Image: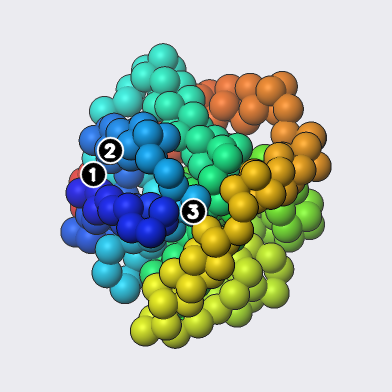
Amino acid sequence: MLKFDIQNKIATLIIDRPAVHNAINDTMMTLLEKAHAEIANNDVRVIILSGAGEKTFCAGGDIRYFATLNTAEACQEMSLRMQKILDGFYRGKIPVIAAVNGSAFGGGCEILSACHIRIAANHARFSFRQAPNGIITGWGGGRRLFRQIGQGQALRLLLSGEGIDANTARDIGLIESVTSSEQLMPETIALAEKIAANPPEAVQAFLALAEKSDATLTAELANFETGRFTTLWLGDCFQTFLKQFLEK
């Protein structure tokens, strides 16, 4: 379910669950954790993250898996676990490029926010669907988004849940560039090769500089986001959404 390969010091991770729009469940988290460990044991200079197929990059959490998390403890454990996985990308020493093969919804957009550079196919669409479902971001995407695209644009996306196309996402800084489906991986690999060819000490220094400029993303803010996510998870609105989804 996770295609994982290392070639020429570039690790490629492809979330491969097209039947459920590449949604994340417990098994996928385990596979991502194992990939992190494997990358740490190899001379990897760049990570490419993508999804299988051309329809969806990632639709966020697998709702059927989410429906099994019916206590505050289980919800918080899942939230913190996925935050740790994404922080491994975002705050690690290896640049991560997202090759956005299709649309990203909810947690899929949170995953994108944990990548350093994002290149999208021109048919991709983006939507933070948390608010319409009675929840907030639980994987750290909310606090990252405020820094990345500014408060006004971030609040518009987060509060409305509206979808935007790839060109609009590029214009507001949610992604960096747009290309065709055919050119997505070639362009991503070409950029990864340029980065991988540079001295890793310099690349890591720039990543460290970027992290220091991100100083407002404090532990206190992370705790607030996780706590509110857990509270809303158990609220009537989100639980109603889960029930209605499972009854379809």
Numbered badge on residue 58: none
Front-most of 180 and 229? 180
Q: Are marks 1 and 3 in contact (CB under 8 Å)?
A: no
Q: Position of residue 56 (x, y in %)?
A: 35, 65
Report the residue marked by disc 1.
246
Spatial distance from mark 1 to mark 2, Cα to Cα?
Answer: 25 Å
Three-letter amino acid code at disc 2?
Answer: Leu
Q: On screen, 198 above or below 68? A: below
The residue nearer to you, when weighing 98 against 228, is 98
Q: Give the image location of residue 158, x and y in percent.
A: 62, 52
Residue at 52% from the left image edge and 58% from the top image edge: 196
1 vs 2, front mark: 2
Looking at the image, is mark 2 or mark 3 nearer the viewer? 3
Q: Residues within 10 Å of mark 2 (few under 14, many from 20)?
A: some
Foreground mark, 1 or 3, reads 3
State the residue position of label 2: 31
The residue positioned 42% from the left and 35% from the top of the image is 40
Residue 131 x/y as whole percent: 55, 47
Element type at mark 1: helix
Per the image, the residue denoted by label 3 is: 46
- Kindly give the residue lying farthest to the top in the view shown: 73
Q: Nearer the viewer, residue 195 or 19?
A: 195
